[in-house]
Amino acid sequence: MKQAVLDFMARACAMEAEAAERYAELAEQMWAFHNREVAKLFGKLARIEGLHRDQILEKMGWTEAPDPSAFRWETPEGPETTDYGELHYLMQARHALELALHNERRAAEYYERLSEADIPEDIRREAAEMAEEEREHVRLIEVWLAKTPDPDARWDEDLDPPVSVD
Amino acid sequence: MIDMTLTPAHYKSDVKPVWCPGCGDFGVLNALAKALAKLALRPEDVAVVSGIGCSSRIPAYTSAYGFHGVHGRALAVGTGLKVARPDLTVVVTGGDGDGYSIGGNHFLHACRRNVDLTYIVMDNRVYGMTKGQPSPTTEADWTSKLMPQGTGLGEIKPMAIALAAGANFIARGFTGDPNGLADLIVSAVEHPGFSFVEVLSPCVTFRPEQREWKKMVRGHALAPAADSVEAATRIFADDGMNLGVLYAGTRRPFAPPIGRAQRTPTDLERRFAL
């Protein structure tokens, strides 16, 4: 396999690894605030991204994912990574799934752009394959979202809010 | 010996942060861990010192040596530590209230002394831990339950103060860009002397409007100047949203000779015995 393709797959693997790490961190944040439902959901998303990372590792015959911090992206972080600033301690499952959907769509678009770019054919082929996998994830999240109720009307109402002055 | 296999995960402790979900400080912890991994420093060769406040919890979340110190005195502790143990990489951390209000005097003199350490200020323009009082960087017209008319006072410009007081490296980062921030921290640690990194770190609880910062910041808009006059011109034209290295000076770091302690801790305890 050409070095350029190896580099591309390393980047793809790092992207999944960073997304998985971030979801795991977000799950911990939610556990700290006793938001069990969303904590479990982020934990599940971390495992899904981890599986995708492991699939790439297996395909490439690698034992360890490359360090995501070794890569730079067009955006501040990887196309599949959730921004820390998007969280709210009272968020509900639908909010979390909407974030996940946004991430999967960004990842799909990233690979679609690469698959149509003026780059070597073998990288375009791998990118097209990755784009299809991400589109499959988009469809899965859309199905998941369809089964998930809308957030309560006053989902962010806290009867003992941190902003209250004692 | 430098261990090249260190990853960011090696610099995080088992203690889980209790910051509010959405807090910018998570991005600083992420960036600091990435920076230390890039620098290939062993955790035991690094000390993270802090004052008091939400952001000052950060030493507990790292696997480096940590000192969660006294309000506003993180720079005094960090300076003493670096002078006594120049072999350690000392990173001092804290918030805008801790660093610019009660710790304002230490900030001035740490810049002036130019001891070789890095100071990371997580600026959210509010005292978060004590429920939302205005800090020295809070905008004059920001109103809250505690300050319904706003302070009416113009906010200070920490980068201008750092430059005037003699800091040898001055930069601004944003928590929504942990990779860019990690690079700034690497440059700050590598630069000799006192390095000051101002980090825009949103407080989503007391300043939810700061979520918009990610649309306002301009990456790497600050080009480094080696000339303090040029840096001063840039900083006074700055709106606070430009990221990058503002100033990288050439002052020699202050490193007093290390002497042996004249008294042991036991001698000191004896003096305080009743």
Image (cartoon, helix red, strand yellow):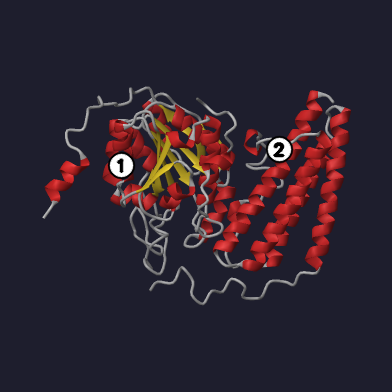
Question: In the rendering, at what x and y percent does residue B192 appear?
Answer: 39, 26
The kind of residue tagged 2 is Ala
Q: Quadrant of residue B219?
A: top right
SS for tag 1?
helix
Residue name at image x 43 percent, y 30 percent: B247
Is B203 in front, or is A5?
A5
Residue name at image x 52 percent, y 30 percent: B39
Q: CA distance from mark 1 to mark 2?
A: 39 Å
Q: Quadrant of residue A125?
A: top right
Same chain, marks 1 and 2?
no
Residue name at image x 66 percent, y 38 percent: A68
Tag 2 subunit: A
- Local packing at callout 1 (Cα closer than 10 Å; few below 14, some 14-19, many 20+) is some
Does A164 appear above or below A39?
Answer: below
Q: Residue B77: which numbered mark, if any?
A: 1
Does B22 appear above or below A90?
Answer: above
Tag 1 subunit: B
Q: Quadrant of the C terminus of chain B?
A: bottom left
Question: In the rendering, at what x and y percent does residue A105 appear?
Answer: 78, 51
Does B218 appear above or below B223?
Answer: below
- The residue that disc 2 covers is A65
SS for tag 2?
loop
